[in-house]
Image (spheres, coloured by chain):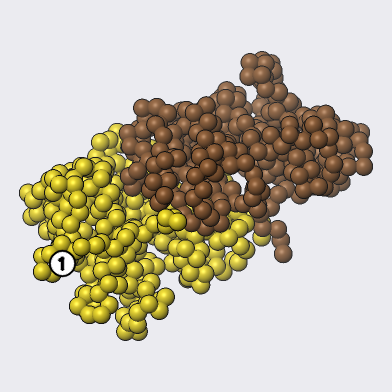
Chain colours: A yellow, B brown
Amino acid sequence: MNEFDLIRRFFNRPPADGTVRLGVGDDAAVVTTTPGHELLLAIDTMVEGRHFFADAPPATLGHKILAVNLSDMAAMGAVPRWALLSGSLPDNDPAWLAAFSDGLFALAECHGVSLVGGDTVHGPRSFTLAIAGEAPAGAALTRAGAQPDDDIWVSGTLGEAALALAAMQHQIALDPLLLPVLRARLEMPEPRVGLGLKLRGLAHAALDVSDGLIGDLGHILTASGVGAEIELSRLPCHPALKALLDGASRPLALQCLLAGGDDYELCFTAPPAARKTLVALSRELMLPLTRIGAITAAPRLIVLDEQRQALPTLPAAYNHFPNR
Amino acid sequence: MNEFDLIRRFFNRPPADGTVRLGVGDDAAVVTTTPGHELLLAIDTMVEGRHFFADAPPATLGHKILAVNLSDMAAMGAVPRWALLSGSLPDNDPAWLAAFSDGLFALAECHGVSLVGGDTVHGPRSFTLAIAGEAPAGAALTRAGAQPDDDIWVSGTLGEAALALAAMQHQIALDPLLLPVLRARLEMPEPRVGLGLKLRGLAHAALDVSDGLIGDLGHILTASGVGAEIELSRLPCHPALKALLDGASRPLALQCLLAGGDDYELCFTAPPAARKTLVALSRELMLPLTRIGAITAAPRLIVLDEQRQALPTLPAAYNHFPNR
């Protein structure tokens, strides 16, 4: 099977809607944008050995490379619409590709996203997906709008993906019945697209937690020129992770919760006047929304422990190029 | 230097125009599209050892990863506008990155393209760039419009990049004064964006020659349900390549001309009535436009040699996954 057969067989599926005038198979796709809307653009890459294990189920990789990009759209309050996929592959194993593309398209169909183009090259296994979405002009959420006294919220729970990774790397032993649950958080993250759309006009600033809460919240603080105080005891997490916080594995639990990465939850700030609306929204979406602290005028990030004492040191955020 | 410093230092430059409301540094870029226009989307990847040598000058790689995407926009008759770059890098060598980004931005500025986002990961060296462009609704050129009796045209010259590669791989010995000229065609291709824009409303079908003339023209024929007859003696090429056609290296010369790849010239079809306009356009753009044959109703591709005999076999197009 050559490159063109391969694309046709696995990645050329009917578009999600009538916005796609020309999809996979020409030099570029041609799509129709929505009048009065701005265009949102993002890109993310996953490399074998760095972002996933060589033996990861291919359907989860197809899911995840799209999920992490949808999460970027969610963080901006945008409707994701069109995706471009580039895959570097060591071989053209049809069964592997079939599973990968099934995983990708299952999620794409959930969100009405059309894969409109791509590229396949021979090389070490990695995937790059670029996404284009839309939001009404001026409505997109950014990192720059946080104001002192805003509440800080996060969706869902934090730290489970990092805890799963720690268990898979034998840094900690977990109940074998628990591991699949946590591992699903690592391998099949659910992008919070619906939440992002509802946060338009409600949140002052937002982003998705992909590199760990501390580091990502830090981006909001820097962009907005403010600080924050958050409370460890308020951070929403799985009971198993909560239990670890009280034992010998507390350092690992702190690392997972505060700097674990791969959460793909939204972190956002909103004025206290929005609390009631957000509680109702949480019920409507059946998604926990938890107030974890507040924005401060002083530009520093403080994490209060269970005794309301500031943690003296904070775990470092994930960095692809550690200082040498 | 961590990932964020690295992005800020080398890749966060002022946008090319006022369409960029929010560039590098948030979860996604926010840009303003042009009313009445369609959006064009494409993506391309270059992997070390496959698309470039490990010791390739970094500025040429920055140039080329953008150039190959601009060439896709050119082939569609689109104005390129916004780019997203993902780089997988084995290290964060600042001198290397500075040269790479200089090469990329030099070309971006020529074409008014803004780099609005990206991703950096640690891994084997490779680059993926996604491009978004615009064309008036309905004006984009596709591969599907070729009609019997259309002339077939190509811009510039063919086969020089492939000949340079053959020389660099010691498959052939060339005049040492010639190699740098040919090598520039391989490493610093000039995307034919200006030509693409002028071909709107003039060409019936178009694409860029990236995988070799035969294979790429084949895409036009398949998409349009037609055939073609082209003449070897009409194919525009460097005198050095022409000379090889008459000697012992004829097989290599044919391979370079017909299936060499990396040309990034436009191949397009147009009715004979457009000949005068295209000759004038060639002069205006100071770019050779050469009529190499004609579209036929019979759906097959014939290449006539210098004696007007059909070549019995055609060189194979480049395939990233050869049949096993």
Q: Is residue A53 left or right of residue B292?
A: left
Q: Residue at x 22, y 80 (%)?
A: A247
Q: Chain of mark 1?
A: A
Residue B146 in sight in this render: no
Residue A296 in sight in this render: yes
Front position in the image: B206 or A65 = A65
Q: Residue at x 39, y 46 (%)?
A: B5
**Vertical comparison of A46 with B167: above or below:** below
Q: Residue at x 42, y 55 (%)?
A: A323
SS at mark 1?
Answer: loop
Q: Amino acid at mark 1?
A: Asp
**Vertical comparison of A180 with B289: above or below:** below
Q: x, y percentage for residue A193?
A: 29, 54
Location of mark 1 (residue): A305
Q: x, y percentage for residue A257?
A: 26, 66
Q: How many marks?
A: 1
